Amino acid sequence: MLVVGLTGGIASGKSTASRLISAHPSRIPLIDLDILARQVVEPGQPTLRALVAEFGTDILADDGTLNRPALGRKVFGNPQRTKTLNRLTHGAIRRRMAWLLVGYWLRGEKVVVVDSPLLVEAGMWKFCGQVVLVWCSEEDQHSRMLQRDTERGLTPEDATNRLNSQLKLASKIPYADVVLDNSSALPPSSSSSGGGDDDDNNDGPSWAKGINASPQLKQQVDRLVSSWTNRYGAGSGRILWLLQWVLPPLGLVSGLWTAYSRRKATEDKVKRQSKL
């Protein structure tokens, strides 16, 4: 089973790419770690108790649930507190993710996407057979945040602080096997650049109609998902998948080797970038 990690940054378009993947006719299962992150801090969960012990009872709402804006005000713009928050939540999220992956493997799924904005920061890229980064410029991120959240009281300074609290998208590129360009500066697409389902007015694949995304992003996602399904859809790829599914030890060895080789290659890329 191919585990694909999908990541990005605030307002980069990762959530839009995630919706496109979920809407694709191939019906690729998707695990949204933001949803798991909400589940592990529900009332009564050990993670919520740990957060209260670290950040204080004022991060709780009157009904005992987590007051996310209050927690955000304590964390955003403070790298040390962001690191503490991640340390307290990531272990619980990983455990839930692992059980979901086991369930999908037992169902015979060939590809599963793990959607996480902190895939790199949390080290979860090491467990993925492929990492996909949704990229745009920092200027695009800043302007999109203001367009989206100004009515909620977000100021330009708040947007800058939130961007500075996360790892820059440029620093995530060495971890990515595929980069989806969601930049506002992309030129208009041509009908020859998309998949076979592109319509005449370049709105992207027909299955993606109604989803608020650029034609370019729709086309990139369509080609990407098609590459996943083709990988195990026929021929030697399908035979290899069947062998790994029927013989779990073979699948385990293959997965460990893939993880090791990808980790080594990625760490080499990160080292080369740090020397530039």
Image (cartoon, rainbow, N blue to C red):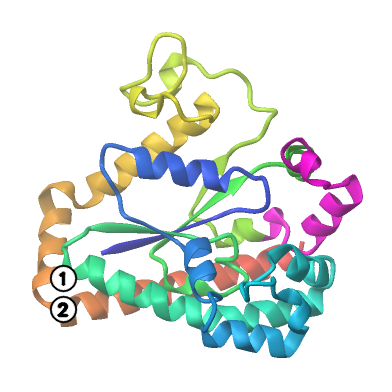
Residue at mark 1? 244
Position of 240 with respect to 11 (left or right) is: left
Disc 1 residue type (three-letter): Gln
Name the quarter where the N terminus is drawn. Answer: bottom left
Residues 152 and 276: in front is 152
Characterize the local packing of mark 1: few (<14), some (14-19) or many (20 or more) Cα atoms within 10 angstroms. some
Position of 45 with respect to 163 (left or right) is: left
Q: Farthest residue toward the right? A: 157
- Write the residue at 52% across / 28% down: 216
* Extent of the magenta region: 145-171
Depicted 195 relative to depicted 5: above or below? above
Image quadrant in which you'd find residue 275? bottom right
Question: Taking the image as drawn, is residue 228 in sight?
Answer: yes
Q: Which structural element holds mark 1? A: helix
Disc 2 residue type (three-letter): Pro
Residues 149 and 133: in front is 149
The disc at residue 156 is none
The disc at residue 248 is 2
Name the quarter where the C terminus is drawn. Answer: bottom right
Q: Position of residue 257 (x, y in %)?
A: 33, 77
Residues 144 and 49: in front is 49
Position of 248 with respect to 224 (left or right) is: left
Q: Which structural element holds mark 2? A: helix
Characterize the local packing of mark 2: few (<14), some (14-19) or many (20 or more) Cα atoms within 10 angstroms. few
Q: Position of residue 95 (x, y in %)?
A: 42, 81
Q: Position of residue 142 (x, y in %)?
A: 79, 43
Depicted 173 relative to depicted 251: above or below? above
Kindly check if marks 2 and 1 are in contact, taking CB atoms under 8 A apart as contact.
Answer: yes
Label 2 vs label 1: CA separation?
Answer: 6 Å
